[in-house]
Image: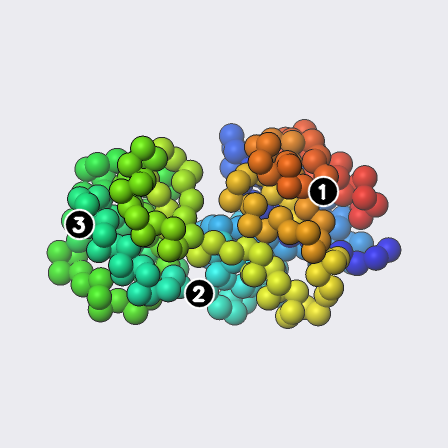
Amino acid sequence: MEKKYIFFDIDGTLTDRKTDQIVPSAQRALEQLQANGHFVAIATGRAHYKAAPFMEEIGLENMVCCGGGGLVREHKLLRNKPLEIEKARALIHQAEELGYGMLIMLEDSIKVWAKDDKFREQVGERQEVTEYVFDPDLDVDSLEEIYKIYISISKEEEHRLTLKDTIGYLRFVPEYLIFQYDDKYSGIVEMMQLVGGELSDVVVFGDDTNDLVMFHPQWTNIAMGNAPQELKDKADYVTQPNVNDGIFKACRKFGWI
């Protein structure tokens, strides 16, 4: 059997979004893929601190995380790229001038920093467990590393933030934008350089528009049946929805398990 290098998104691909737990048939597929000698890894936008426990829980040891900025090989975090600091500072200054609340991630943890509580006052709590650190003297221009920026701006007002396209960004909820490293493709390529595989043997599974960046003609791209049409249109194969055993069925169809 030809060895494949298979990368899975987490949320909505491996996991049931209703429970945040891995789909049982997906877990079986991961186990059988590894037993058959395939390289199996995660490719996620999640920060390392949030993705690593899940990786361990499902029995994997390799991961592209932080939107491609983080690489984990055999359980070890090899690197975690921050945002380009000058672009990040400029974006923060613009958002501040426009009156939007912000949260800034300065390290690989649940902590986010802010000068004030404007973000929560404008849009409420962040959509995941968070420790808020408020520092009125926070000086953005003295910061050396910034990993994520949350800005309380609605889709209708995005045009006001003219620097938004200088950094990768995602919107998972209507209330705010997340600016983060967004290049799963490059992360996968770097992982393949580490493990020595051919890019033509890569397979990626995804379910949402944030996976578009890792769908590439160099390799095999599989969209879940629960994915939006935009991702399906870029896929080589569209499987069943993840909760309908989409991962297991695709792996069986291609003869990997």
Amino acid bearing label 1: Asp
What's the distance in space between the residues labelled 3 and 2, CA to CA?
A: 27 Å
> Along the polypeptide, which appears first: circle 3 or circle 2?
2
Foreground tag (3 vs 2)? 3
What's the distance in space between the residues labelled 3 and 1, CA to CA?
A: 45 Å
Q: Which quadrant holds residue 206?
A: top right
Please state the total of marks drawn on the protein image. 3
Dot 2 and dot 1 residues touching (CB under 8 Å)? no
* Image coordinates for residue 105, horizontal then vertical, percent: 32, 56
* Image coordinates for residue 78, horizontal then vertical, percent: 52, 69
* Image coordinates for residue 83, horizontal then vertical, percent: 38, 61
Q: Which mark is residue 81?
A: 2
Q: Quadrant of the N terminus?
A: bottom right
Residue at left 72%, top 65%? 197
In the foreground, 23 or 165: 165
Mark 1, residue position? 236
Residue at left 42%, top 38%? 172
Foreground tag (2 vs 1)? 1
Amino acid bearing label 3: Glu
Q: Residues within 10 Å of mark 1 (few under 14, many from 20)?
A: some
- Spot the residue most to the right: 1
Residue at left 28%, top 39%? 153
Q: Which mark is residue 97?
A: 3
What's the distance in space between the residues labelled 2 and 1, CA to CA?
A: 30 Å
SS under mark 1: loop
> Along the polypeptide, which appears first: circle 2 or circle 1?
2
